[in-house]
Image: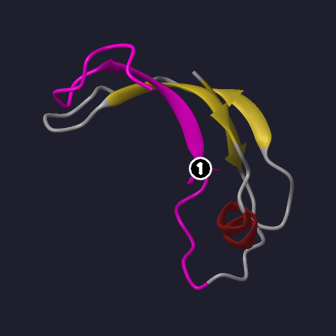
Amino acid sequence: MRAARFHAWGVAPVLDEVPSQARADGEVLVTVEAAAVAHLDLTIAGGDFGMKPQLPYIGGVEGAGIVAEGGGLAPGTQ
């Protein structure tokens, strides 16, 4: 999958190819159709936020997609 990853704090993300993760029990696999870089993503990426995830960091708190499998939802559900 493609992901915008932050490799250092305070610099622009890089579009990388990364392996997809397997869906765990109780999770829903969603094919993301649209995603946004939200205020929280920019705040964390700036490096001044109290929480600093391990780098490289894949942001993402807003998105829209279609269910691929899992979670008791029919595939194709938005």
Residue 36 at x, y = what percent?
Answer: 71, 45
**Residue 66 in view:** yes
Query: Who's the residue at 56% across and 54% down the image?
Result: 61
Coloration of the structure image: secondary structure
**Label 1: few (<14), some or many (≥20) within 10 Å?**
few
Q: Position of residue 22 (x, y in %)?
A: 30, 26
Please tell me which residue is depicted at 54% across the width and 78% down the height of the picture: 51
Q: Which residues are magenta?
A: 50-78
Residue type highlighted by circle 1: Glu
Residue nearest the observer in this picture, 75 or 13? 75
Q: Which residue is mark 1?
A: 62
Residue 21 seen from this side: no
Query: Is 21 left or right of 38, judged from the image as shown?
Result: left
Q: Position of residue 71 (x, y in %)?
A: 20, 31
Magenta span: predominant SS is: loop
Q: Residue at x 86, y 52 (%)?
A: 12
- In the rendered structure, does residue 53 fall within the stretch colored magenta? yes
Residue 75 in the image: above or below residue 58:
above
